[in-house]
Amino acid sequence: MGTPHAGRRVVRFVAPMLAASLLTLTACGGGGSDATTGGGQSTEKIKLSVGLFGDFGFKPLYEEFKKTHPNVEIEERQAAYADHHTNLAAHLATGAGAADVEAIEVGYISQFTSQPDKFHDLKQYGLDKRQGEYLDWKWQQGVAPDGALIGLGTDVGGLAMCYRTDLFEKAGLPSKRDEVSALWPTWEQYIETGRKFAAKAPKDAKFFDSPGEIFRAIIAQAPVGVYDAQNNIVVATNPDVKKAWDLSVQMIDAGLSAKIGAFTPEWNTGFAKGSFATVICPAWMTAYIQDQAKNAAGKWDIATVPGGAGNSGGSHLTVPKQSKHPKEAAELIEFLTSAQNQAAVFKAIGNFPSIPSLYDQPDIQNFTKDFFNDAPVGKIYSDAAKNLKPQHLGPREGDVRTAVGNGIGRVEQGKQSPDEAWAQVLKDVEGIK
Amino acid sequence: MASPPGGSLRTATPSPGGPPAAQSSPGGPSGTGTPAHPRAASGWRSRLHRLDRQASPYAYVAPFFLLFAAFGVFPLIYTAWVSLHDWNLLSSDNPFIGLDNYKALFADGYFWNAAFNTLSIGVLSAVPQLLLALVLAHLLNRPLRAQTLFRITLLLPNVTSVVAVVVIFSQLFGRDFGLINMVLDWLGFGRINWQAGVATSHVAIAVMIMWRWTGYNALIYLAAMQAVPREIYEAATLDGASSLKQLWGITLPMIRPTVIFTVIVTTIGSMQIIAEPLLFGAQVSNGAAATGGTDRQFQTLALYLYEKGFRSFEFGYASAAAWMMFLLVVVVVAFNYLVVRRMRGGLDV
């Protein structure tokens, strides 16, 4: 455009077009948001979304809920574990996109409860009346530092040890669950059993999958884990962490590991193929194994875990602030976490209730699972949950565990000596604020 | 997006005989509401015509620039702004900390480790990839039976999903049951834990990238080669030049602009590799996926950024890393551009 005269005309010409286009853009961005407003009149049609990682066994319960809430429609979204929490964080930060009910796993719960302004305080909807029913430590995990009630617990992950009876028999070890439990009251005895197993077992079967999950379990059994009660990372100073590390290294040195990382494709096939004879088994894991090793039914059984009780995993249900129907969402949470429904979920898929009054009820106590050789899972996980000692989990729990897990991985891959790996773990953990 | 400006443009053009339609159009120049005098119609029309000729090209390209501003420039500037804060995705309090993120980044060995991995994987994948693409295109640039079949075959790896490619290749590179290790074992070389080592994991990832992009580049080269006049080759053949010599002496100089284009695009692409290392890591260890292996042996810059931003939610720090990555891409692309441009040497025809 040559002359300044023409230039001015261009501005006059383009400016309205810019405005028009921007209007179109804003229209695109703003659409849809106004579609569902209004406060919860019981006659109005409402759609509640529920964001979960994996199957929580809720689907049959939604139908029940609709009987008392005929105007509510429920849509469940499932994502993978890490993606689910990453997306939730992004949705909370941008103020849009989160579901009305969002599940949060204990590894992340402290990170989210430290941002209470992003969630509805469930006390406002009267859910604090449920406190007396819950395991106290489970209840506290869902409470923000300022006292707001962020989430209600679904399940707890009391620890047990799953094992392959056929591989144990081939290795000349006892295969009945009580006898197996008697083999390993401590982790040292577990390693000892592993040595005996390795001496006679088939060549392609190792004693356990990889030390990563075992490390987590040993940490979970300690009174203090990677965080102290004041939210300081104590990996370097807590002797229990170093003990868990040393035990993991011993297991690697003894050649007991199949070197198959948890939740990888090879791990999934390992269940069916019998690549490893034992695996750490929180209650929720039973559903996972059953899913992955369908044709290995009756070959897996469940014994007690070495080293005492501990908790690994479990979740809470929350209502993000951006939910437009917090009242109905809170009602749904109350329903899904009720004692009766927690028991139903346990029987359906295996997630173990966080309501202790259920533990001694006969229908839980006598509940068995035929996939696991008719193991009395109700009794096993009740005992595990009753003996649980609460442990404080910090905000960056997951990052700390990844750093330590990578260190164990480096030792296992022979990339570093245990001392070098530990030094690097301490350095990595220092960088986590 | 293109239709509203296009529509208003058309209405802005005066229709013969009738009143100027632009009068009622918000997009037209008279949208300000000034009534047009019938007397001034002819001068008005010629002015409008001139305006149409001079301004409409800008109006036509405006939608792109608007979108680019919204989705390109704005995020770029906003990222720079975020990078000056201690910005946690979950926190509502994000204090301004100036250049502290950049200072921390420069001192962060893992960032430089990721930069090295990115360059290493980039070189390992781009150089053989482009050379191979050139040779493939040269082989196909002659009368062949079933030409279309060959060309489709070339493009096929590119349309497969990256997830599928990485999953399959991770199995091929598997430690215990991988086909590649089985062959190596059979040949007496012993097994390799591809994922564990720095060099081995880089080679494995480079192979995945090459698999997807070699054919694509070959097709681009082939298209450029077909524009080279046949007579030059005929003359060269008469003079006794071999096929390889023709490739080096005629084809390469003639398609140099295309070569520069592919080098730049491939460089930019390889600086942003993320899906391959992330999924490759997830195949063997769930926790080590975002860190690119237990020792970060194959964590690329984009993956480092992902780890900081979307695993640890440190958006300020991740934004600083993003800007450093952007500058690094610019530097590397500029370097490659200069190298390729200098390569003309005595090859000109």
Image: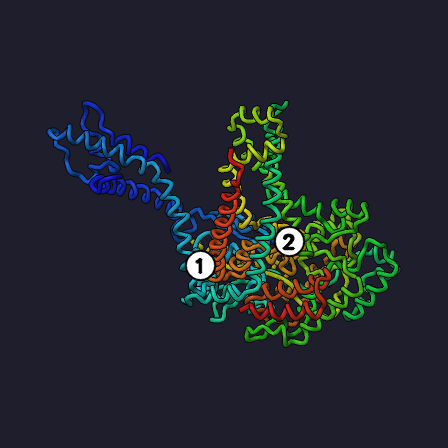
What residue appears at the point 54 percent right and 61 percent down from the top-left corner? B312
Location of the N terminus of chain A (image quadrant): top left
Q: Rounded to the nearest whole Å, what is the CA distance between mark 2 and mark 1? A: 35 Å
Relative side of A430 to A253, left or right: left
Identify the residue under disc 1: A321
The answer to which of B2 and B122 lies nearer the viewer is: B122
Query: Under tag 2, what secondary structure?
Result: helix
Q: Amino acid at mark 1?
A: Lys
- Dot 2 falls on which chain? B
- Dot 1 falls on which chain? A
- In the rendered image, is residue A316 in sight? no
Q: Are marks 2 and 1 in contact (CB under 8 Å)?
A: no
Q: Locate residue B73, reporting x and y percent.
A: 39, 50
Q: Locate residue A281, reporting x and y percent.
A: 71, 60
Number of labelled discs? 2
What residue appears at the point 67 percent right and 65 percent down from the top-left corner? A407
Q: Residue furthest left?
A: B39
Q: Residues within 10 Å of mark 2 (few under 14, many from 20)?
A: many
Q: Amino acid at mark 2?
A: Gly
**Labels 2, 1: front one:** 2
Identify the residue under disc 2: B281
